[in-house]
Amino acid sequence: LNDGRFILKKGLVYNVEKFLKILRTLNQEYLTSLDHHSSNNSSDLIVPEYLFKKFPFMQTLIVYSKLIADCKYDLTFLNIILNNMIRNLVTEETGFRYDTIVRQFVTSLYILGGRTAYEFVRLNIPALLPSVQIIQTYIAASDNPEAWFVAEDATAVVPKVTYDTKSNTFIGFSLPLDSNGLPIQNSYSTDSFTRLEEWYSDIKRATLLNAYLIQPLSSSFHISPYIFAAYGTDNKSESADVISRWYKIY
């Protein structure tokens, strides 16, 4: 127009408004994508390089997590152990919790390894094993609270034959074993000096004392470990004797 104003046709106005609407839509989508990307970045864990140098096992865990799906070994139990231990490490010690499978494992470790070995592992691997008191409570609450732990061990002795007046036997010879792998008592009883000479010539003297110790697993008994059987041996036996002996004991 002569006064400097413009007149736009309705078609041009429509196209301009449509163009602006598209720009607003694209701008909104762009802002949304930025927010989403920002939120994703905030959930990512960035580990500084100095931590990898200080704790090399972290890199091993990353490699482990990548290979776990394709590993030919069953790592279910290992995963439970690691998850339980790491979960305990990030909580107060009074809040430590142990999965059922972990409790069963540590109970077996306590029974088979004994208290000293159990405490050694527990002190060197924090948050992995519960205290001995917790283990004893767990055993006492199990289906068989009167379970006992039996151990067999041998210690070296000086070979020597003596006469026992109560049993009228000579003690110090290596005792023979019966079909159950147990020593035959009173095997060397005789009134013949000639027979005794034959034993000295033919029978080996015991160089070891084989002892059996028993201890209740539950602390409610308040009983210390004690020896319930011992005999002299030269440690010459077969695996079948050992298996038969333990089968008979149990």
Image (cartoon, rainbow, N blue to C red):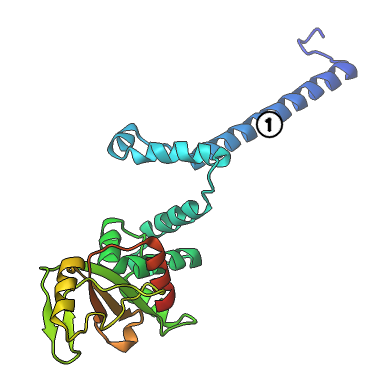
Which of the 4 image quarters holds residue 3?
top right
Give the structural element (helix, strand or loop) at label 1: helix
Assign the N terminus to one quadrant of the image. Answer: top right
* Crowding at mark 1 (Cα within 10 Å: few <14, some 14-19, many 20+): few
Tell me the kind of residue under disc 1: Glu
Q: Is residue 225 visible?
A: no
**Which residue occupies 36% across, 57% down?**
89
In the rendered image of this protein, does residue 220 appear above or below residue 10? Answer: below
Residue that numbered label 1 is attached to: 29
Query: Relative to 168, is 89 above or below?
Result: above
Direction from residue 175 to residue 104 in the image, left or right: right
Residue sitting at the far bottom: 166
**Which residue is pictured at 83% across the width and 19% down the height?**
15
Residue 230 position in % (x across, y down):
24, 78
What x and y, as percent, mark residue 113? 32, 65
Closest to the observer, 181 or 11: 181
Report the quarter where the C terminus lies: bottom left
Q: Is residue 62 visible?
A: yes
For this rendering, which residue is in front, 133 or 205? 205
User: Left or right: where does residue 62 sit relative to residue 212?
Assistant: right
* Depth check, front residue: 248 or 193: 193
**Among all residues in the image, which is located at the extreme front?**
194
Question: In x, y percent, where is residue 47?
Answer: 39, 37
